[in-house]
Image: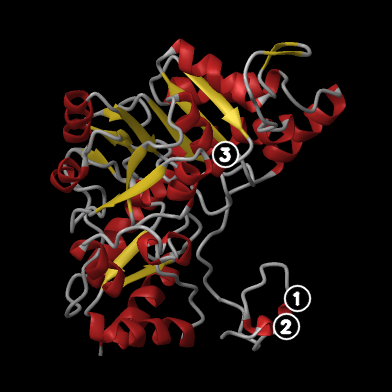
Amino acid sequence: MTEATDRYDPLASAGAGPARPEPRIRLASPVTGEEEVEAMRDVLASGILTNGPATRRFEAAMAERHGTEFAVAVANGTVGLAAMYLAAGIGPGDEVIVPALTFIGTATAVSHVGATPVFADILPDTFTLDPADVARRITDRTRAVVPVHYAGQAADLAALRRLADDAGIALLEDAAQAHGATYRDRPVGSWGDSAMFSFTPTKNITTGEGAIITTNDEATAQRLRLLRNHGMSQQYHHEILGYNWRLTELQAAMGVVQLGRLDAILATKRANAVILGELLANLPGVVAPVAAEDRDHPYLIYTVLVDATRRDAVAAALDEARIEHRRYFPPIHHQPIYSHLPDPVLPVTEDVYDRAVSVPFHSRLSAADLADIAAAIAAGVG
């Protein structure tokens, strides 16, 4: 049994474990400046710190950017997913199909509303849900399918939309990583019955914490507003069981400014993707991210596949170069909290995780940084 002192503690001081050199190239580096400071200063001066005009501006800007009638801001991505599921009427006894290669919140939010996540496999190029495997897992208890736009690249939304419509179930997009992405020239967030965008510091644009749910359905938008604010349709009149899932005005004001930065950030990252792809092109056993022709890839995450026998060596070479890296993401069906569920057969998910190395890809990377990342990968593959 693991000793308590060896367990992960996110609040532990830096000196509690083995000392590690400070990364020279970090995974994330948010782009912020005086504009965000000024926007939040204006909010503080107004005295309105929640449920105010900044939230409405942020919602309107996100809805316009992603081609939807409505957008509802909430406190963070996990509660955003739960709110989206609840607004779709999902609850105990229901099943929701999700990928296993995603951040665990996609699945735990299903559990939070009393439903059961069903894990489906992914496609080997985009790492997004495989529509054929989704079709095999639909039952009479299935209420929704949740495509995750891995690294920001859209899933095969046309195929998944057809599947959902034919089965009479909801299509709910986990667009946490996909701000500004498109599929067949149409924004993500507008294909599903609703979609959740997250704004944690690793995202292309950030409010620290926070999320927005987009939808074209007015009844869904109204239910989301009730859910985030104690079920109140007017002061102290509670229509449904709600929660305190509000975004602050400070975060919303920052979000409006960040959204204005998005196009420049995406242009830089797409240009850098070409550069890094060329640097990796001739390395044996290395596969750079694939961008499907009918999608605009925002490259939130840059996951490289290497030979499974060399993955640890690549990780060690990145450590030696003080380049931060992760494996996005450990398959959820292996997590202890889901050990009670039937073990699904997900060969592509397993293969991708065995070979995956996710390296820094924020918009502040220099040409020298990209060269150093490629050199470390080259050293690892030998």
Which residue: 61% across, 32% down?
74
The quadrant where residue 243 appears: top right
For marks 3 and 1, the one nearer the N-term is 1
Q: Is residue 263 visible?
A: yes
Q: Which residue is mark 1?
A: 13
Within-10-Å neighbours for mark 3: few <14, some 14–19, many 20+? many
The span from disc 3 to disc 1 (Cα, nearest Å) is: 28 Å
In this orientation, which residue lies closer to the viewer: 322 or 370?
Answer: 322
Which residue: 21% across, 24% down?
165
Q: Amino acid at mark 3?
A: Val
Q: Which residue is mark 3?
A: 79
Q: Amino acid at mark 1?
A: Ser
Within-10-Å neighbours for mark 1: few <14, some 14–19, many 20+? few
Label 2, secondary structure: give it.
helix
In the image, residue 158 lies at what x, y percent? 19, 31
The quadrant where residue 316 appears: bottom left
The correct choice, above or below, for 147 with respect to 232 in the image is below
The correct choice, above or below, for 288 with respect to 88 in the image is below
In this orientation, which residue lies closer to the viewer: 246 or 367?
Answer: 246
Q: Amino acid at mark 2?
A: Ala
Residue 16 shows which numbered tag? Answer: 2
